[in-house]
Amino acid sequence: MALYRIYIDEVGNHDLTHADDPNQRFLSLTGVILESRYTLETLQPEMNNLKQTFFQRDPDEPIIFHRKELINKRPPFHPLRNPIIEQQFNTDLLLALARWNYRVITVVIDKRAHRDQYAIWHYHPYHYCLAVILERFVLFLHYNNHYGDVMVESRGGQEDSKLKDSYARLYRQGTDHIPSERWQERLTSSQLKLKPKSANIAGLQLADLIAHPSRREILLENRLIVDSRDTFGDQICAILRQSKYHRHGRTGQIEGFGKKLLP
């Protein structure tokens, strides 16, 4: 029996108003499941060592991994403008992503298809994705006799209130597939944990590094986008497919367990 936390990162927005816009059509949530002691004793110190190796560190300004800033090589990630340093960092990051012990669940919703399928009644896209991802987390906890909680990066204001309400509703009411008793049995808190990016949470940063590549892979597999580029994210996804995506315990199937497309 152990304590686990799922760290959730969002890519896209949950607004249905612009669902026809290709740039706003898809929303995804990626959850990274980590055992709490492992996070404290292994992930956090190793991630900090990786940062200290490659980037100048101000003791009062902690380095926080953010995929977009890494890709654009903005300070404090400007050392990556040197191709040699960038290559070594990419190699070390991939080795770490393969070495660290975590599980990944990514849920993507096609908001346009969701809107068209449910023309009269719309299940809120974020709540829908959150329900699907947390159903799998609760079952993971149940079948392994573990307990856990949930953390999401804070967005501030009304966004945080919506996130809290979505989580509280799931905890209180359960879903059609998993009754509320099981949610309350396995989740240690009725409250969603929210932390800002500045809090330097290793699990949230890991989710941020993985979320966009995982979403892109699902969209490509389902022919919802066309993109023939060979990207660094493809190497991340190869690691996820090999050993990180959540799977069916008996068959090892990823689809429907570690990766899910809605509706």
Image (tube, rainbow, N blue to C red):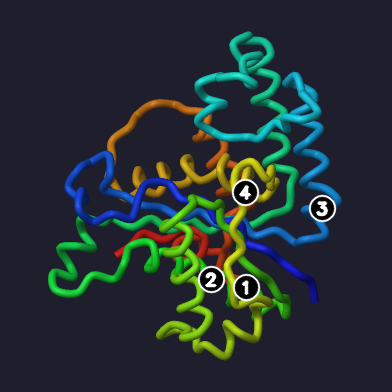
Q: What amino acid does circle 3 point to?
A: Leu
Q: Position of residue 55 (x, y in %)?
A: 72, 21
In 3D space, how far apart are the residues under numbered discs 1 and 4 (Cα atoms)? 19 Å
Q: Position of residue 245 (x, y in %)?
A: 57, 55
Q: Nearer the viewer, mark 4 or mark 2?
A: 4
In 3D space, how far apart are the residues under numbered discs 3 and 4 (Cα atoms)? 13 Å
Q: Which residue is mark 3?
A: 40
Q: Nearer the viewer, mark 2 or mark 3?
A: 3
Q: Tell me: residue 229, above or below residue 86.
A: below
Q: Which residue is mark 4?
A: 204
Q: Which residue is mark 2?
A: 136
Disc 1: CA contacts within 10 A as few (<14), some (14-19) or many (>=20): many
Q: Which residue is mark 1?
A: 140
Evaluate if marks 2 and 1 touch, with contact meaning CB atoms under 8 Å apart. Answer: yes
Q: What amino acid does circle 4 point to?
A: Leu
Evaluate if marks 2 and 3 touch, with contact meaning CB atoms under 8 Å apart. Answer: no
Q: Earlier in the sequence, mark 3 or mark 4?
A: 3
Residue farthest along the front direction in this orientation = 157
